[in-house]
Amino acid sequence: MGEQEPKEIRVFAPATVANVASGYDVLGFAIDEPGDEVVVRYSDKPGLRITAITGDGGKLPKTVEGNTAGVSAQDLLRHLGKSDVGIEMEIHKKMPFGSGLGSSAASAVAGVYAVNVLLGEPLTKKQLLPFAMTGEASADGAYHADNVGPSLLGGIIVIRSNQELDISELPVPENLWAAVVHPDIEILTKVAREILPAEISISTATQQMGNLGGFICGLYEEDYSLIGRSLHDVIAEPFRQKLIPEFYKAKQEALSHGALGFSISGAGPSVFALCEGEKNAQKVASAIANVFNDNNLTNQIHVSRINQQGVHVVNN
Amino acid sequence: MGEQEPKEIRVFAPATVANVASGYDVLGFAIDEPGDEVVVRYSDKPGLRITAITGDGGKLPKTVEGNTAGVSAQDLLRHLGKSDVGIEMEIHKKMPFGSGLGSSAASAVAGVYAVNVLLGEPLTKKQLLPFAMTGEASADGAYHADNVGPSLLGGIIVIRSNQELDISELPVPENLWAAVVHPDIEILTKVAREILPAEISISTATQQMGNLGGFICGLYEEDYSLIGRSLHDVIAEPFRQKLIPEFYKAKQEALSHGALGFSISGAGPSVFALCEGEKNAQKVASAIANVFNDNNLTNQIHVSRINQQGVHVVNN
């Protein structure tokens, strides 16, 4: 490694809201905060090693195979034939597990992106998608790009096919803001999946399809009213709301305070509203948080524009 | 009626392709030919009367309530408080019943539009949608805008909600052509509905949603490849193909001749391909027709751009 300059790369991968009401398993968007950080540097010892993990409450093992950042990075190194390059990795979790904000996806994205930058960016961001997917699948068991995609690329993405990893970036209306509130309970993705029925009626499916179509049109046309009319989830929300205390009260408050729409972020328990403008998003976030506060449920508020940058290098 | 000038209005409402592979019950587009014509003129006898029907093989009764053109026109007249105005209507069917090309929808659209024009256009085209829907529902029993919408407005439309009649017009890439082939068999919409399962797996629904999202993006981005990758129907086609002789052979021929995608038009038996350019559409249409010809199944070919005009007045 003698000829390589010693350097350190620190990257930030944003949290993400998957499903987005009308896009169960096919839509996701990124927000500014929270997110996970990964630091990588060259080392004289060959191979990838994880030297520190913070913010995980001691839950993650320090083996490369034991967390999504290690797995995605290792998968990239293998692909590039660079498994023997000595790399140290630190993982700084800045959001809770099981929050519905794509925690494992953010780490997977941060891990693979950090290593790619360290190596001089042999691949483009979009080319990193399959490695990040492998990383997330190691924790999640499922192979979905609805968190990994937006955490990597930023913006709002629609997934034509998870199997073929065919994803498209949708336009983001300038004044579209997200109000995300995370109540302090944990929902395991496994539980959130098992609560759904195996089958739905064709009429339920076509309702969801209509709303998905309306939502995508609304983004392209910057038609906030159409976006709002389209933010309905008839597939997952009716079942998963049971896992979130006072869900419908929070929804009612969000809508009565002017949110375009409101639903569950990913598998929950985080909830999100989309709003026109920052001021409205702040007001809606407070109204949602108040419902949780009234039930002695501590929570964190995250208000931001749709994050269009995705994973990026941050200064040390 | 003395002060009204005697005049006659002749309108043409185009055939339509509903479902469009990835948009079961939520997508539809119009084609140039075939289509139905309706002629209206003032009469001294009060009320709406149907004086002639051609092209129906004697199947349609001449009562106003007996066909979709009469019902939609009557519904408009009632709404405008003009049920007593004397109007004669002729209906000229130019496409077969049960063809999957929106025959009853085209008549409903032509009927209401002709009367609206005769009365000096008190309503806009889009405002005529509910009356045309009522007309089609009188024949079809179902309340879907996927044929009525594009026959009225032209172009490609997506229906956010049939119940709320919330529809959006999608952009039409300039070089997008349709190759439609109608084999001479009749499929009753009722039979085509009953052959579908009541329920589908969530994973089937999300596949279809991904393809719908990709298709709409593809239209906005004029990305013919994405349009092609998105033209898959995993909801209706696997069941309804059984009603169409040699369906998969026709599909294979269409795709191997360069079609972007191929599926069933509405409830069938007509099939359609979307193609890039007229030349390819002609080639694809011939390849499909040859499959039917080889099975001694007579058929009609309709090749056109997506019709962006919708229903319109034609010269006598």
Image: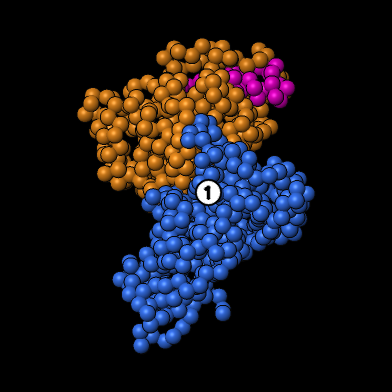
Chain colours: A blue, B orange
Instruction: Check disc 1 and report its element: helix, strand or loop.
Output: helix
Instruction: Looking at the picture, tell me which residue is in the foreground, A48 or A180.
Output: A48
Residue for badge 1: A189
Residue A266's place in the image compared with A210, above or below, is below
A246 vs B95, left or right, is: right
Q: Position of residue B141 (x, y in %)?
A: 54, 20
Instruction: Looking at the picture, tell me which residue is in the foreground, A98 or A12.
Output: A98
Chain of the residue under the numbered disc 1 shown in the image: A
B237 vs B27, left or right, is: left
Answer yes or no: is residue A153 visible.
no
On-image quarter of the N terminus of chain B = top right
The question of residue A207 being in magenta is answered with no
Which residue is at 49% across, 77% downward? A9
Which residue is at 51% across, 11% downward? B61
Residue A168's place in the image compared with B135, above or below, is below
Instruction: Looking at the picture, tell me which residue is in the foreground, B242 or B98.
Output: B242
Which residue is at 51% across, 43% downward? A193
Q: Which residues are magenta?
A: B69-98
Q: Position of residue B121 (x, y in %)?
A: 65, 33
Instruction: Looking at the picture, tell me which residue is in the foreground, A40 or B161.
Output: A40
Q: Position of residue B293 (x, y in %)?
A: 24, 28
Answer yes or no: is residue A245 visible.
yes
Total labels: the figure holds 1
The crowding category of the residue bearing disc 1, from other C-alpha atoms within 10 Å (few below 14, some 14 to 19, many at least 20), is some
Disc 1 residue type (three-letter): Thr
Q: Position of residue B131 (x, y in %)?
A: 62, 27
Which residue is at 45% across, 20% downward? B190
